[in-house]
Image (cartoon, rainbow, N blue to C red):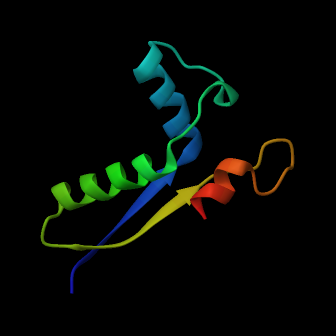
Amino acid sequence: MDQIAVFVDAGYLYAQGSAALSGQRQSRDRRILDTEAAIACLSQTARECEPSCKLLRIYWYDGSIGGAWPTSDQAALE
């Protein structure tokens, strides 16, 4: 069975996402991620790129800010 995995660098997603939405990069604390919409969009994009493959998993890479672990965003994505 063919499977596909999606790898997300959270820092890059926030930086480039804020730039795409506002025209400039903004600090992460100024943006709120709609986790359900983000997961749906990533899943849909994977299906469009490889329609014959099953989505195995979305891997989300993110560091903690100021040592707090997990952040509220990370907990929501769990």
The quarter holding residue 74 reads bottom right
Q: Name the residue nearer the viewer: 18 or 72.
A: 72
| Left or right: residue 45 compared with residue 64 | left
Residue at (42% x, 55% y) in the render: 39
Examine the image and state in which quarter residue 48 appears.
bottom left
Expressed as whole percent of the image width and height from the top left, the position of residue 25 reads: 55, 19
Counting from the top left corner in percent of width and height, residue 57 is at 41, 71
Viewer-closest of 56 and 71: 71
- Residue at left offset 85%, top offset 50%: 68
52 relative to 71 in the view: left or right: left
For the point 62% across and 56% down, the residue is 76
Say how many tags the image has. Answer: 0
The quarter of the picture where the C terminus appears is: bottom right
The answer to whether residue 55 is above or below residue 17 is below
Query: Which residue reaches farthest bottom?
Result: 1
Q: Is residue 75 above or below residue 67?
A: below
Image side of residue 2 versus residue 77, left or right: left
Q: Residue furthest top?
A: 23
Quadrant the N terminus occupies: bottom left
Estimate the x, y position of residue 34 in percent, counting from the top left.
50, 43
| Residue that protrudes farthest toward the left in the picture | 52
Q: Is residue 4 above or below residue 28?
A: below
The residue that appears at 59% across and 29% down in the rendered structure is 31
Side (left or right) of 47 relative to 40: left
